[in-house]
Image (cartoon, rainbow, N blue to C red):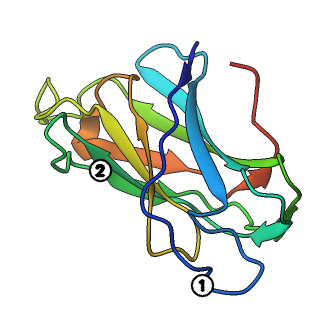
Amino acid sequence: MALIGITAGPSQAATRSGWADTSSLSVCVHGLDSGAGQRYATVVLMIKTHKTVRTQGYAGLQLLNSRGRDVPTQVVRDRGRAELITLKPVQSAYTRLHWADVPAAGGPTKAEKHPTRLEVTPPDSLHHLDTPWKLGDVLQKGRIDITPLVKGTGPAF
């Protein structure tokens, strides 16, 4: 599947010296192989500066519609261990996303609003990065399961 665009939100001063923030990162989303109503993707945060930075934990996510309004998004963290990651220039960290493309019992059969953008908030950051979302609807009240960030760009897409 294709690489989905990159844009940055407002820059911020680092919350902690040496930690990754929106001024040092870019973001992209890769769709992964999926099947039987299950969808997968990776969100990749790549260092865009010449400084080495650290990060640890889970990214925040919010789906938006074409008017910039929130689409129901319920981020559920898995029970993985969040390791401290040191990233050198042009290195990346990623999280794997999982969501359902089938309605839950008693739930609506269609998403209420179709997401077109994804806001990604790096760990320990107050600001977000913005990228297009071209991976379809997220049913079951917008539930997206995520893993903690790990070093690399993720599985092949």
Is residue 24 in sight in this rendering?
yes
Label count reads 2
Q: Mark 2 vs mark 1: which is more N-terminal?
A: 1
Q: Amino acid at mark 2?
A: Thr
Give the quarter of the figure containing the C terminus: top right
Give left or right: position of 83 versus 24: right
Residue beneath label 2, please? 73
Residue beneath label 1, please? 15
- Asked if 30 appears above or below 75 in the picture, the reply is above
Per the image, label 1 sits on a secondary structure element best described as loop
What residue is at 84 percent from the left and 48 percent from the top? 91
Q: Based on the displayed image, in which of its 4 quarters is residue 74 positioned?
A: bottom left
Tag of residue 120: none
* Image marks 2 and 1: residues in contact by CB distance under 8 Å: no
Q: Amino acid at mark 1?
A: Thr
Give left or right: position of 87 versus 122: right
Give left or right: position of 88 versus 23: right
| Most foreground residue, 112 or 35 | 112
Give left or right: position of 84 versus 157: right
- Give the foreground label among 2 and 1: 1
Instruction: Estimate the spatial distance between the alpha carbons at disc 2 and disc 1, rounded to whole Å.
Output: 25 Å
Local crowd size for mark 2, using a 10 Å CA cut-off: few (<14), some (14–19), many (≥20): some
What residue is at 42 percent from the left and 45 percent from the top? 144
What residue is at 21 percent from the left and 48 percent from the top? 72
Residue 19: % across, % down: 72, 76
Residue 130: % across, % down: 42, 47
Give the quarter of the figure containing the N terminus: top right
Per the image, label 2 sits on a secondary structure element best described as loop
